[in-house]
Amino acid sequence: MTPEQVKFINEIAAELKTQPGFNLREEVFFPLRYDKHRPVTFQQTQIAQELMPKDLRLGKGDYATSIGTTSQNVVQAMVNLYKEEMEKDGVNLDILINGKQGQRGTWREAYYWLWNHKYLRWLGLHSWEILHDNAKSSANWLQFLTKEEMASVQRGTRALILPSPPPSAQKTTIPANQSLWMLVDLELQKDKNYQLLLLNRSQQGQCLLCPSSAYAPNSIIEKPPIVLPQKDAWAGNSKEKFVFGEVGKEEFLAIKLEKPLNLPWLTPREDEALPEWNAERIKELFEQLEQQGNWEVFYQSFEVVE
C-alpha cells in the first residue's frame, strides 16, 4: 500500500481497538484482510495460515479454524463504530452483519465501503497534510510582485525576472487588496518539460490555481520562472491579477511532474474557472501520482497583511 493508505488503515485500526470483541487476533487480521493491494479473492484461510502466524505477538496456534469469527468480529466493530456513515452511504447493515458465508455482504461489503467511501472522505480531509509532509524545502520558489515591481524589471515585451532573494530577504507577507503577479521558479533539468500543479489553501478553502482557465490554462513549464496569471488566462486580461482581500495565512503547494497527468478535470474549462478540489479528484490524483513515481512537492506560506 502507499504511505497514505497505510496511515489510513493504521488510524482506522486504532479506532476499532476501542470496540468490544476487537482483540489481538482482530488487530492482526484487520490490516491483512483490508489491505488495498491484496485481491479480495485471496482466501481468509490463507491469511490465517500464511500471514497471521508471522506476527510474533500472536504466538503459535491454529488461526484458520476460527478465522470466520475473527473476520465477523472486525465487521461488527466497524458497524458499531461507523453505523451512521455506513447507513448514509447505502450499506445494508442487516446483510452485512447477518449475511451467510460467501455472500457479498459479509466482509467484502465492509471492504468496499472502507475504500470507496470512508477513504475518500479521509483523503479529502488529509490530502494537504500528506502532500505537505512530502514537500522539499526549496526557499523562495514562489514570489508575489506588485505592478510597480513587475514594471521595474520589464524590458519591452519580455519580462526579465529578478533572481530569488537570499533566505534572509525572503518575503513572508502579501499586501492585502492589491493586484499582484505570481512568480513560480522551480529548478528543472535541461531539455525537459514539466507539468505544474499549484494548490492554494486559506481560511476560505482550497483551490487549484494551475492548471485553470482563471490563472494558468497552460500547466507545462518549458523553462522557469513562470508568471501567473498567464496572458491567455481570464485574470491575465483583467486589471486585477491575484488579489487577497482578507488578512490571514495563505499556503501554496506545487507539484512538479515529469509526465503530464491524464485527468479530465485538469483540462481548463471556462465553466469551471478554478477546478473544484473534491474527494473524488483527490483520490484520482493520488492514484496517478502512485503510478508515475517521478514527482516532487514544494511548499510555501505567506501572511496577508494590511
Image (cartoon, rainbow, N blue to C red):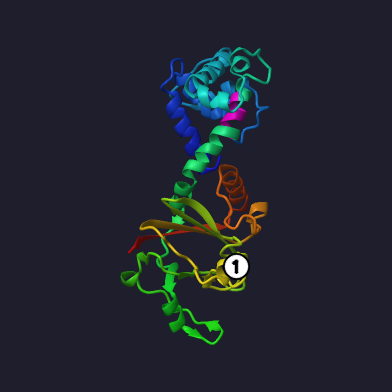
Q: Nearer the viewer, residue 221 or 268?
A: 268
Q: Is residue 104 above or below residue 198?
A: above
Question: Do we see residue 70 in this rendering?
Answer: yes
SS label for mark 1: loop
Residue 44: give x, y in percent of width and height.
Answer: 61, 21
Question: Does residue 140 lie above or below 49 as drawn?
Answer: below
Residue 180 spot, x, y in % from top left = 45, 70
Return the residue nearer the eye: 190 or 95: 95
Q: Quadrant of residue 97?
A: top right
Residue identified by numbered label 1:
233
Q: For the residue marked with disc 1, what is the amino acid?
A: Ala
Magenta stretch holds residue 113: yes
Image-based side of 281 in relation to 164, left or right? right
For the point 50% across and 33% down, the residue is 9
* Outermost residue, left side: 168
At x 68%, y 17%, the residue is 102
Crowding at label 1, few (<14), some or many (≥20) Cα neighbours within 10 Å? Answer: many
Task: Tell me the residue at 65%/20% (across/down).
Answer: 105
Start-end of magenta stretch: 110-115
17 w.r.t. 226: above or below: above
